[in-house]
Amino acid sequence: MRYVLMMELRQLKYFIAVAEELHFGRAAERCNIAQPPLSQQIKKLEEELGVKLLERTSRKVSLTPEGSEFLERALDIFGRLDEAVVCIQDMAEGLKGHLRVGFIGPASLSNLPRAIRAFREANPDIRLDFSAKSTTEQLPMLRGDRLDIAFVRLFGHDTTGLKSMTFLREPYVLAIPDGHHFGGRDRLDITDLEGEPLIFNQRIAQPALYRSLIGSFHKAGFMPNIVQEVNTEQSTIALVATGLGSALVPASSAVDKRSGVVFKPLDGDLPQWEITALWKAKKESVLLKNFLSTVTQFRDVTGSTPVWELLGTDSGSL
């Protein structure tokens, strides 16, 4: 079948040359072939089609109506073939293609949107599809090839067979409602939270992280007074704004300048808050490598940037 296809493309090439030159000698020169074999290939093509494409006389060569139609379609075939070659070459170089990106909600408050914008501006022919999902939802999607890269929050998750890069590492801060008695403090310590009503992320969503945070309070000598558990950082901030309690949140949450909430730096033996990029080692395409190269430029893994520096202000009360 491959031999037949090659013969057909070669015959089309010869026919196009004759049809455009309307001269067998010039067409043979153009195709770098002797005139007799060229004539034989055109004759063979007409026999296979069962249609006369060219009128030949001793003085001139002209196209039949069928030949004119066939020329137009033959040119279209070669045009599409050229486009296909350029397309797959661009894909091989990571200039074209399709990338599916998963991310947890809090990643939208990090440098990730800036990284994606930079990549899109530099790669306008790349199609990006996004899925806002929890870490637990993203991992099977990544392993099932429904995502190419996932931005997740790992805490005891199985990442066997996956490559990773820490994209963000930052401290926890305390979100307090406006008018709170901590409002006049520049900095707080975890020991200051004894007896304070606190809003926590749900234990079922991140059990290992939940245990780690509880352990931090235990090391400080007391157990937290948890008045509500919620499943997203956004819900946490919203409840803080109602005055229900305070909450430990990642420093980048301070980007959400929600009315009624103030953020305070918090000292203590607390875990760092991290966002990790995950992808399958066996699916590391040129396109994905190019995306990772851009994302790397926007990483923040110092883990010590004060909240007011994140927002470009000079005050601990935002």
Image (spheres, helix red, strand yellow):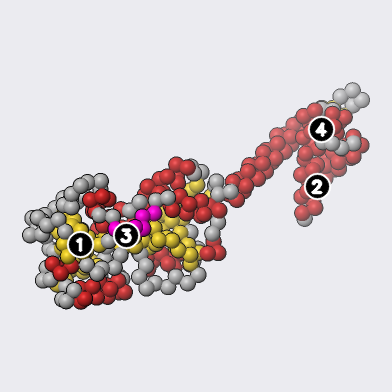
Locate the N terminus and report the quarter of the image it occupies: bottom right
According to the picture, the residue beneath numbered tag 2 turns out to be 7
| Main SS class of the magenta portion in the image | loop
Q: Which amino acid type is marked by label 4? A: Arg
Dot 2 or dot 3, earlier in sequence:
2
Mark 4–mark 2 distance (CA, rounded to whole Å): 18 Å
Quarter occupied by residue 252: bottom left
Rendered residue at 22%/67% (across/down): 268
Rendered residue at 70%/40% (across/down): 78
Mark 3 vs mark 4, foreground winner is 3
Label 3 element class: loop
In depth, the one of 307 and 155 nearer the eye is 307
In depth, the one of 73 and 249 nearer the eye is 249
According to the picture, the residue beneath numbered tag 1 turns out to be 266
37 relative position to 203: left or right: right
Q: Which amino acid type is marked by label 3? A: Gly
Rendered residue at 90%/36% (across/down): 34
Q: Does residue 175 show up? A: no
Q: Which amino acid type is marked by label 2? A: Met
Residue extent of the magenta highlight: 299-304
Mark 2–mark 3 distance (CA, rounded to whole Å): 64 Å
Mark 3–mark 4 distance (CA, rounded to whole Å): 66 Å
Label 2 element class: helix
Q: Does residue 74 show up? A: yes
According to the picture, the residue beneath numbered tag 3 turns out to be 303
Dot 1 or dot 2, earlier in sequence:
2
According to the picture, the residue beneath numbered tag 4 turns out to be 30
